[in-house]
Image (tube, rainbow, N blue to C red):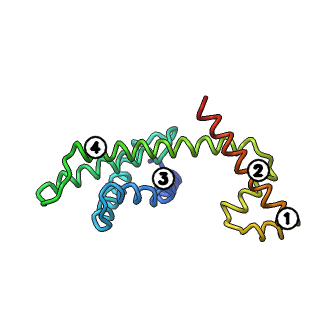
């Protein structure tokens, strides 16, 4: 890391993805206390390896890779305890989670691309509903459109996005 601006950006990315890392680790270990410990180790390792991060690549998959190794290290170190998964089983479980994450990440990318095809007005409506959490009635009030018109438009937008994503998956 070169300067405090780079450090701040890196910390912002790490902070943004904390809940995803926590969920990934918890799903892998199934125990909150151990997951918390592994998350702390993961954060420390991520920080130590910050200079190795290639900013041209997505942050989350890189961080998840580090979390994966920390999970395996934790399970290896815990090998003296009574109930421990064989490392092959753990690898298989983590690979399944990685595959699920890759599918989710691909869907997010496809959704983002499909959203770019919408008008600014429709993007604004979706933002009001899903990013800001406004109710349909609140959106109706703030836009001056009827409740039924907003409901119908939201239904059409969701269908349009679903169809767009399905087309992208078939390509």
Mark 2 lies on residue: 156
User: Rounded to the nearest whole Å, what is the CA distance between mark 1 and mark 4?
Assistant: 51 Å
Identify whether 164 is placed above or below 144.
above
Q: Secondary structure at mark 1?
A: helix
User: Rounded to the nearest whole Å, what is the CA distance between mark 3 and mark 1?
Assistant: 38 Å
- In front of the other: label 2 or label 4? 2
Estimate how packed mark 2 is, as few (under 14), some (14 to 19) or many (20 or more) residues with alpha carbons within 10 Å: few
User: Rounded to the nearest whole Å, what is the CA distance between mark 1 and mark 2?
Assistant: 17 Å
- In front of the other: label 3 or label 4? 4
**Residue furthest toward the top?**
171
Q: Secondary structure at mark 4?
A: helix
User: Rounded to the nearest whole Å, what is the CA distance between mark 2 and mark 3?
Assistant: 38 Å
Q: Position of residue 137 (x, y in %)?
A: 78, 70
- The reply to whether the C-beta atoms of the residues labelled 1 and 4 are less than 8 Å apart is no
**Mark on residue 91?**
4
Q: 120 or 50, which lies in front?
A: 120
Q: Position of residue 165 (x, y in %)?
A: 64, 40
Q: Earlier in the sequence, mark 1 or mark 2?
A: 1
Q: Secondary structure at mark 2?
A: helix
Identify whether 163 is placed above or below 21.
above
Q: Earlier in the sequence, mark 2 or mark 4?
A: 4
Mark 3 lies on residue: 10
- The reply to whether the C-beta atoms of the residues labelled 3 and 1 are less than 8 Å apart is no
Q: Position of residue 164 (x, y in %)?
A: 68, 39
């Amino acid at each position: 890391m070169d300067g405090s601006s780079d450090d701040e950006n890196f910390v912002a990315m790490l902070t943004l993805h904390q809940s995803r890392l926590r969920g990934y680790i918890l799903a892998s270990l199934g125990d909150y206390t151990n997951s918390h410990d592994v998350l702390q180790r993961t954060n420390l390792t991520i920080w130590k390896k910050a200079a190795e991060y290639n900013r041209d690549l997505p942050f989350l998959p890189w961080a998840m890779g580090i979390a994966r190794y920390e999970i395996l290290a934790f399970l290896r170190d815990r090998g003296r305890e009574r109930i421990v998964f064989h490392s092959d089983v753990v690898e298989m479980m983590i690979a399944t989670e990685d595959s699920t994450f890759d599918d989710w990440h691909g869907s997010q990318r496809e959704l983002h691309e499909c959203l770019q095809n919408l008008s600014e007005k429709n993007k604004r409506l979706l933002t009001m509903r899903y990013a800001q959490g406004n109710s349909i009635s609140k959106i109706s009030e703030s836009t001056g459109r009827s409740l039924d018109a907003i409901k119908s438009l939201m239904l059409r937008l969701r269908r349009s996005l679903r169809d767009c994503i399905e087309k992208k998956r078939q390509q």
